[in-house]
Amino acid sequence: MKYFKYSAGPLISIILSLIIGAIFIILIGQDPAEVYVKMFTDTLGNSYGIGQVLFKATPLILTGLSVAFAFRAGLFNIGAEGQMTVGAFASAWAGFTFTSMPWIVLIPLCIISGFLAGAFWAAIAGYLKARFGSHEVINTIMLNFIAMALVSYLVNNIYLVPATIHTPEISPNAVLLRFDVITGMFKGSPFNLSFVIAAAVCIIIYYVIRKTPFGYRINTLGYNINAAEYAGMNVKRLTVYAMAIAGGLAGLAGLNFVNGYKHYFELGFSENAGYVGIAVALIARNNPFAIIIIAVFFGVLEYGGLTVNTLVPKEIVTILQGIIILLIITITKYFDKKFKLAKA
Amino acid sequence: MEELLTITFVLQTLRITIPYLLPSLGAVYSEKGGVVNIALEGILLSGAFAAAAGTFYTGNIIVGTACGILAGIIIALIHSIVTITFKANQIVSGIALNILAFGITKFFCKILFGSSSNSERIPGIETLDLPFNPFLLLCVIILGITYFTINKTRFGLRLRAVGENPQAADSLGISVTKVRYLGVLISGALGGLGGAWLALDQHSYTDGMSAGRGYIALAAMIIGKWNPMGAAGACLLFGLAESFTLQFQDSGIPTQFIQMLPYVLTIIVLAGFIGKANPPAADGVPYEKKD
Amino acid sequence: MTNHLAVEMKGITKTFGDLRANDSVDIKITKGTIHAIIGENGAGKSTLMNILYGMYHPDSGTIYINGNEAVIHSPADAIKLGIGMVHQHFMLVNTLTVLENIILGDEVTGALNTIDKRRSRQKVKQILNNFDINIGLEEITGTLSIGTQQKIEIIKLLYRNAEILILDEPTAVLTPQETDELFKTLKVLKAEGKTILLITHKLNEVLGISEFITVLRNGKVTGNTETKDTDKDQLAGMILGGSFESIKRKQNSPAEEFILEIIGVSVRSDKGLPAVKDLSFEVHRGEIIGIAGVEGNGQHELIEAICGLRDYSGSFILNGKPADKDLPVAHIPANRHKHGIVMEYNLAENVLLGREGEAEFSTGVSIKEKALRAYTERLIKKYDIRPAEADLLIGGLSGGNQQKVVAAREMSKHTDLIVVSHPTRGLDIKAADFVHSVLLEESAKGKGIILVSSDLGELLKLSDRIAVMFNGKINAMLDSATTNEREIGSYMLGLSGSGGDKG
């Protein structure tokens, strides 16, 4: 019953949005049943499809977790997109710069670089909030654009491989292997070890939030910043830490593309994962394990869009995403009131 | 020759400023009333698409412009329903609408024009031929009207009141909902008009042509401290900077750094380095009656 | 004779969730009188008046205005019927000018819906003249004092030609002298034929100014009388419902030795202005020192400095040793919901607040959940917190029990110094009494207590000495055995003492 109360809103939103999506599909003269059936059978019906879905889900787990962690601290991180971008570039940079290192050093180095770059980028917004009280929503949006411009400069003006639009390739020792290569499963899909990293990070964050004094402080900050201050917590430092960790998580989201898939960095790799992460966190109500499930669902949508592209433009999926978020924030509010749920 | 360069430069600057200024003034209406409108990006984009489609099918610029405005109003209406009536988070609603607009424009671009990247060529407006281009004139008039409305009229007073202390306004019999709806819808209309300009100026719709201008418009409004004249000044500044890079492309300054300018400036202003930026006290907060 | 009645409310019932805020309330208000509605906090006074003003909608019941049945769906309806209300929390837009605040919602407009400033100003000026009130109309409202803001609220009602004026706890934020001034204005209004409904819980005021009194308790009317036919004891009986014996005054007297010496401390306000100016006093072992003052005279900043929440200059000496930033201090903050508890946490998690790093509750890596739970259950028993469930969300507790949780947590820190702000604000009398007894008990153990309160009765009852703050300084240090409310009030306003020189 408890789970029903928490999931009723999201479930109804998803169903309603599929119905609204059906209207768009009918509008262009296609059969929604056919489109939806194809969308789900081509994604979840075979191991290649599942591999694609999990591949798409991987960065969404991390950006969703990033937004959720910030939410826990009462901070709204709209900057996952930018943090992910600088993080991905940093991972790539480490991968193509320290090419002589063995994998046991280089892979952790790529992971740490991505985390730190994202953390630094988000910490700017955290610091500005703590020091000057300027709102993180606007600042993280601004930092997204600055990140885009900065990385565009680095890629196009400094590290560009001539006649391409990307950076040099990372060392083979920096590659996170595909499951296909390791196990022979998910044949041909780019599903790779980044997923394991993402899942492990979920477990760690869950433990931190639920069980540790630090997590308790983060929660207190989010629920009641004044009470946190009166209880003697260093609210400013906590704000910077919370943003930094959120940014670090988003920074890891680039691993999937850079170290797991293409093995280089290029602009536009993110496919809005930073923004979609907001939806993931919202629907999952900031619960790390629910985030994995919701990210997989969004993975189904994203890859599903590609599978039905011959019937309807794949943007039907983007439309669905927008509608789901709008419905979630209105409907969930209604159910929370009805079931008297506390803020998640 | 040098003079020609100057006139070209001025017109170029104004041309670039228009799609910042219109949504930025829109943002003033919305935020003075207490509703953060990040959806302006999507409003601009769908305004551009609707204007292009409208013009393409009717061959009439005015009808096309009206379509652009209408599209902006529709997105703003959804934003109002979600955030004012249902009191949902304004930021999330804005982001969702931006995602939605991004998807819908691309979806229908494929359906109507058979291409996911751009529309066919449409009739438009030649900026550089027309010192008194109708959009430019319209911009100046709208700026004047906005300043006057916010500061001198009953609606302006009520708008400022519901953005600052909705409960006080409510206690005096003012409908917070009505005033806020009006503010957001006006911002949608202005954003849609700005989008129409983008399409008409380019003689076509291209995918994602709002290119972050909705966010820059918000930034300009913040730098302008939530005032129409200040917002206009900031928009002009951004227009100048961009025009400058176009004019002097070989100046050695990487364009990316000029692109960063509005965003960096906004962060600096928000941090309070250039005077104090005081948003309306209830900006971003849904008004919940206790009953 | 019904046309003598300005207001009649019949069978008004209003529930919030499980709470019956009003339970078939009947009330009749005679035209041209001052009618007081009294009762404890939470008795349903404000709810009833918010219904009359259209802010809340009753579940059942009828309202008659001037003898005619009225349906009041919104404040706009109420205003049309000539009803106006000054809310406990002022309904002013801080960034607007005084004039704009007064005309808001009923603007005098010219062409194109522009505001006709000249005519609005004329209209307001006339009201100011009629009632002999003086305010600068172009001032920014947020910069004005509480007393002035209250005047603006009253002018707002007069501007709308309100005939029935509701004032919700108007004196809660005023000094005795400001209260006198307000009452003078109310008498002028009555003389002009206005009907005034006064919500309060201060019996002295009620007896002084009103002609009729209605008493509410637990949402029901427990008394309806003419003021001249009643007295304090009878009213107290109606308010409390049966006899209730309050605890005694303080028994123990302070020791010679100091717990805390405050030497030349200065603190700045949020706006960066000097709020506490070179202030010094001592707290003895076993002493309760009361701090009185009109809100905004530095009490808040002083408390925050002592509790390490605000930077200061000067020094604190604790038990004879100069203390650095973090004084070990137990703190019951003024605003419980804002500063004292986290509504989304259960009792145990609220007990953990500020103590999550202590070895008793943390292994260094994770929180010792069993130890925390056992500890919380001990406190629940000791402080008689109800319901006695450690994993219940604190939002499910009454205000009194929430305050007990805060008190329990803070007292169990075993510090020598205790700082308490407005500890009984919003509590019913029994809960307030419990909090008082806890403070007296701690004092008897030899703790030093600093008590800030706007309830002068509370200060007089509990304190050994009362420091009156004015303009960031201590304007007088009074012995509570020999002083009285009027004397304290006069120091609070700077009418007496040296604090008057603007330093």
Image (cartoon, rainbow, N blue to C red):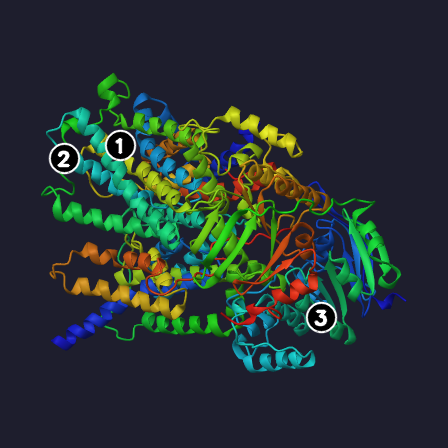
Tag shown at residue C162: 3
Left or right, residue A137 beside residue A187: right
- Neighbour tally class for label 3: few under 14, some 14-19, many 20 plus, Cα within 10 Å: many
Which amino acid type is marked by label 3?
Ala
In the rendered image, is residue A269 in sight?
no
C198 vs B77, nearest the viewer: C198
Residue C150 rendering spot, x and y as whole percentages: 63, 67
- Neighbour tally class for label 2: few under 14, some 14-19, many 20 plus, Cα within 10 Å: many
Disc 3 chain ID? C
Gap in angstroms between the C-alphas marked 2 and 1:
16 Å
Which amino acid type is marked by label 2?
Phe
| Residue furthest to the right | C1
Q: Secondary structure at mark 2?
A: helix
- Neighbour tally class for label 1: few under 14, some 14-19, many 20 plus, Cα within 10 Å: many
Left or right, residue A151 beside residue C105: left
Asked if labels 1 and 2 touch by Cβ distance under 8 angstroms, the answer is: no
Whether discs 3 and 1 lie on one chain: the answer is no
Dot placed on the residue nearer the N-terminal end, 2 or 1 = 2
Tag shown at residue C404: none
Gap in angstroms between the C-alphas marked 2 and 3:
77 Å
Give me the residue at 25% from left, 55% from top.
B260
Tag shown at residue A96: 2
The image quadrant of residue C295 is bottom right
Give me the residue at 11% from left, 31% from top.
A99
Q: Secondary structure at mark 3?
A: loop
Residue B240 rendering spot, x and y as whole percentages: 24, 67
